[in-house]
Image: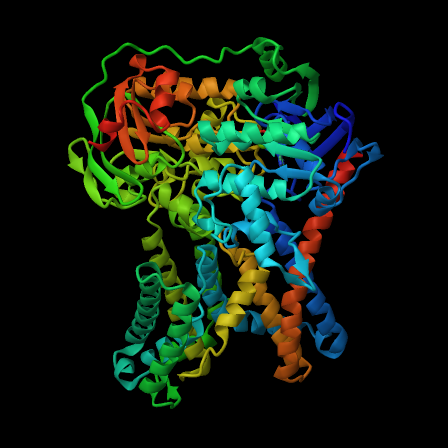
Amino acid sequence: MTAPGEVVLALSGVVKTFPGVRALDGVELEVRAGEVHCLLGQNGAGKSTLIKVLAGVHRPDEGSITWLGEDFHPATPQAAMRAGIATIYQELDLVDDLSVAENAFLGHEPHRAGFVRRADSAQRTREILGRLGHPEIPPRRLVRSLPAAGKQIVSMARALSHDARLIVMDEPSAVLAHDEVGNLFRIIRELTAQGIAVVYISHRLDEIREIGDRVTVLKDGRTTAANLPARTTPTKDLVSRMTGRSIEYVFPPRAGREPGPELLAVRGLSRDGEFANVDLTVREGEIVGIAGLVGSGRSELLETIYGARRADAGTVEMRGKRLRPGDVIAAVKAGLGMAPEERKSQALLLGEPIHRNMTLSTFTGYARGGFTDVATERAKAQETADRLHLHPRDVNRAVRTLSGGNQQKVVVGRWLLGDTKLLLLDEPTRGVDVGARAELYQLIRGLAERGVGVLLVSSEVPEVLGLADRVLVMREGHVVREAAADDLDESAVLDLVMAGSLLEGEALA
Amino acid sequence: MSVTEAPPVAKHPGETKTSWWKGDRSEPVRRNLGLVGVLVALVVIGAVTRPELYGDASWVQNNVLTILQQASAIGVITVGMTFVIIGGGIDLSVGAIVALAGVWATTLATQSYGAGGMIFTAIAVGVGVGLVNGLLISYGRLVPFIATLAMMVAARGLAAQISGKQTQVSANSVINDIASTRVLGIPLLVYILAAVVAAGWVLLNRTTFGRRTVAVGGNPEAARLAGINVRRHTVLLYALSGLCCGIGAIMLTSQATSAQAAMANLYELDAIAAAIIGGTLLSGGRGTIIGALFGVLVFSTITNLFAINNLSTEVQNMVKGGIIVAAVLIQQFRYKSLTNLFSRVKTG
Ligand SMILES: Nc1ncnc2c1ncn2[C@@H]1O[C@H](COP(=O)(O)OP(=O)(O)OP(=O)(O)O)[C@@H](O)[C@H]1O
Ligand SMILES: [Mg+2]
């Protein structure tokens, strides 16, 4: 294996253009064996494009790449993998109808005489899952049936199934809960101890401080700072190199105004195996946050309130009127809106332009006599795009060509357009960069000030505490604590969220 | 700000001057250009193989009208099919619906109500069968392929039952005259096709119905969570296809002055193929009406080419299969090579 500290990968002057966009415009990057090299940059800065160039998905137009001392031009993803570069993509790239093991070893199945050795690959998958701290995922299970976090684990298992010398991770923590991130870091440390290099992308600065060794910052497809020490570089330096301005990563102050009358009342809501006996209310102008681990039933709860899933028991009332269970259309008519967790499969028409995606739930409202009013739609979408600092600003562009964080802004933007009375937000800032995040917080708070009720689910505890007025903590399908956000702090919430807290009795009540 | 736009595209965001060869909007144009190319090639082949005919201007004019007339009924049916496919489904029963609607409209009992009764019956049967398809698929949760395959068999069976396997002659002169009427020298059937295509284009591109169709076909889960009534819309799509079949049934009945259970045989395949080579994605979410029209025209021009050369239908079917593959390949090739070429020119 390479000696630790030796440069394994060097990029210089790498350029990649898409029609109309210069996604990479002269990138410099140097990665050493055994280090965790972090890539920082705003949404659309070119991080994902850069790693796709490394992974052989895109071919660079200019520039040189040196891998283990040799010129490197991977023509296909297989070539890059064979050369020892494994990649975990930002957008999951698993085959839903194959099993966990089949996905992990897709393209390099252990085989004999053309037959896949299924027992062998299942066994090896089990080992890898064990290393990842998830021995409970059965290798033969269909990937379709796993929750988002489980899928992320499988794509990690796939990367580990190669004997890679560089593992690239594009926002792996975005779909992971707090304890999962800890697990991920443990694995990263194991890998780097073996001399494997890791390129790590995240918008969460605290993670970069914790796991990173060196940081390279991208802005507009260019390297604006290379090889900064990850732990000691001041935050404001990092942010200003990313954005060209300095942004405070803070939450807008609460209005201090009393919320209005009750908007949403949920009573005894249950779904077998997901959550049980949940009571909650949201008042006009109030932001209610739900904290909990992935798998605690928070997303399922949100979807059930919205009518996307049918409750087994309990009622949902909007302004005193009962909503028909399992009926999204009735919920939307009553003024509910939901930005779902998985943007690609649940929210976006990838081939359609941004403006059509943004107006997907409002275009009927702009229409006259059944005829759509595209001019108004486009203008409204453009307004929202500008408020969210969407890059690129051109709303005619297909959503497919947007970076992950910008796709997320389109999903949230959709519900800023209508006159939604109650907004259900499931991980609204997933993959959104620091600057745009502050903007999004402001918008959400602004909505609340106009009387909109917000029910917010987030894996990031500071986000829930900073944005919400009132917080519900969920664990294993039960609400274990409800309190004003000011009465809780991060460690208290984390204690509650993990098992074994003092309030065990309350959970069962 | 964060994106360095390569000049000259979208230098001023908002005022979007996307060049014609790229961007979503222009893709249909590019695809249609490919089909126009195929059409031109077919005409050239015709002119080379039968130069004596092509020398005669009035023959050429008549031949063009013949091709259009032959494309009319299948063209109308293809418009409905295109909507169904964009909406994420497939309708294998269109040929059978046409036969059932045609037969039902020409029973002695129906004919006693006159032309209005016959037209009403054909359309009602078409829409009715389409509704059944839609209900089975949306609320009965049958896969579209299976539901419409079953309907294809069942509707033809019912048509044979009603007609007693006899050819039913239409004695109604109004119906029979539709096919022979010309307005300004152009057959009425061609006007009907033009009207249906125009209506289909407006419906797809300018109405909320069209927008829902794209959303439902592109990502049904996203459409549902955005508050679109996916099930109801699916029912409407199959009813629309049935409506087009009803119109097509009257057109074909008029052309033949009769109807029978075996009419419109294999029209489902022609309609699907025309929609697909016209750029409609078989998986749903994308497609164009104009492209589908070109697809139909390509097919009827091939049929015509074989007819004027007195070649058998067997050969014709083999060539049709080849053309489907070729047209799709050409479009893919054009797409890739053009995109590559231009991105290279721009960087270089
Ligand atoms: N296939 C494509 N076609 C056209 N433009 C693209 C394509 N893929 C990416 N882009 C553009 O390239 C730029 C860089 O995108 P990239 O996905 O690399 O950003 P990113 O840094 O990963 O952002 P995020 O933090 O949001 O994931 C963006 O402006 C994006 O719109
Ligand atoms: Mg990215």
Q: Position of residue B320 (x, y in %)?
A: 63, 73
Q: Nearer the viewer, residue B333 or A253?
A: A253
Which image quadrant: the N terminus of chain A?
top right
Say if A49 sits above or below B209 in the image. above
Residue at screen point 43% across, 42% down: A147
Say if B202 sits above or below A256 in the image. below
Q: Quadrant of ligand 2?
A: top right
Image quadrant of residue A160? top right
Q: Nearer the viewer, residue A489 or B164?
A: A489
Asked whether, in this view, residue A393 is left or right of residue B145, the answer is right
Say if A32 sits above or below B71 in the image. above
Q: Position of residue A501 (x, y in %)?
A: 32, 24
Which image quadrant: the C terminus of chain A?
top left
Asked whether, in this view, residue A503 is left or right of residue B148, the answer is left
Image quadrant of residue A394? top right
Q: Position of residue A204 (x, y in %)?
A: 53, 21
Q: Position of residue B283 (x, y in %)?
A: 51, 56
Residue at screen point 36% across, 82% down: B157
Residue B228 showing in the rendered view: yes
